[in-house]
Amino acid sequence: MPPHPAAARLMMQGAGHASPPTPELGLITPAYLRLHSDATLAQRVARARRALLACNLCGRRCGVDRRSQLGGCRTGTIARLASYGPHLGEEDVLRGWAGSGTIFFGSCNLHCAFCQNADISQSQAGSLTPPAELADIMLWLQARGCHNINLVSPTHVLPMILEAVAQAAGRGLRLPLVYNTGGYDSLEALELLDGVVDIYMPDMKYADAEVGFRLSGVQEYPAVNANAVRAMHRQVGDLVVDEQGLARRGLLVRHLVLPARLAGTEAIVRFLAHEVSPHTALNLMDQYRPAHRAHEVPELRRRTTGEEYRSAWQAAERAGLTRLALCSR
């Protein structure tokens, strides 16, 4: 089967530059299987559950006991499931020909003014779903032929996810795990995920802390985000794409270009190129549209222009990024 277009672009855009190291693809197995085989994954589940007693899973560090209190994510000790199913709207290297097995969790640790999934992320939408049922869903997605398990907005429900993965691994789950996060993850949370996650897909939303507070209601987003992305890359390295054009392991960053340069794209692409890796796979997204409470922010009342997007793309090229995955244009 020929590579998918995005995989071809990723390979071609690296031409003329030193290539990222590529391991033998046949040797890549989902990371969590190794931890499951020696009971380390079960130990991680226990540690993650203890973290809920004084929650520090994200940059908010609410410190609440989630058995009896709710922090910024408004979630207790049971994950709220919004929806799940094969998804063909993700990056080509994730969706392939059979879809990415997405699991959308309700609520979120970020409160973005322009969130396009606000009906899920900013409400109590969905049903409380224990880990055993999440494991059932993962296995169902695998049976449907999905290429991966794509955990969307997972940060605040990390302990429940780990427990579900441990159960599903014991019952035959063999798909790569995609951690599809807003990027406001604590280093303690990422330590729990080391050796569990195959593909990290964080957002890098803002380069300015004041903008992060204004638009997402969190403190020090750029610093928390940068530390998280560095840690993710240390764990999984640059994105590895197999001979069929599917992502198998590594870091894939998403950055949404906002109107009026609010996202600070130039600083973010320089950070990725110089402090993470020039071979970082970046989806530079142009699909911003006013949604949710965007009308409350004057700069966000319009869509991103073509010129703003072209300028962002050129900034990424100038910074030295060699693997720009163009998904929307």
Image: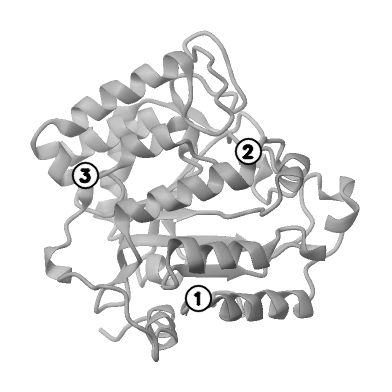
Numbered circle sitting on residue 321:
1
On screen, residue 13 above or below 213: below
Q: According to the image, label 2 marks what residue?
A: 110
**Left or right, 276 with reference to 263:** left
Q: Residue at x 35, y 20 (%)?
A: 49
Furthest-top residue in this view? 68
SS type, badge 3? helix
Sooner in the amino-acid sequence: mark 1 or mark 3: 3
Which circle, 1 or 3, is nearer the viewer?
Answer: 1
Residue type, mark 3 in image: Tyr
Query: How far apart are the alpha carbons under marks 2 and 3?
Result: 27 Å
Sort mark 1 into few (<14), some (14-19) or many (20+) by Cα contacts within 10 Å: many
Question: x, y (%) of residue 157?
Answer: 44, 31
Q: CA distance from mark 2 to mark 1?
A: 28 Å
Quadrant placement of the N terminus: bottom left
Q: Quadrant of residue 79?
A: top left
The residue labelled by disc 3 is 32
Screen quadrant of the C terminus: bottom right
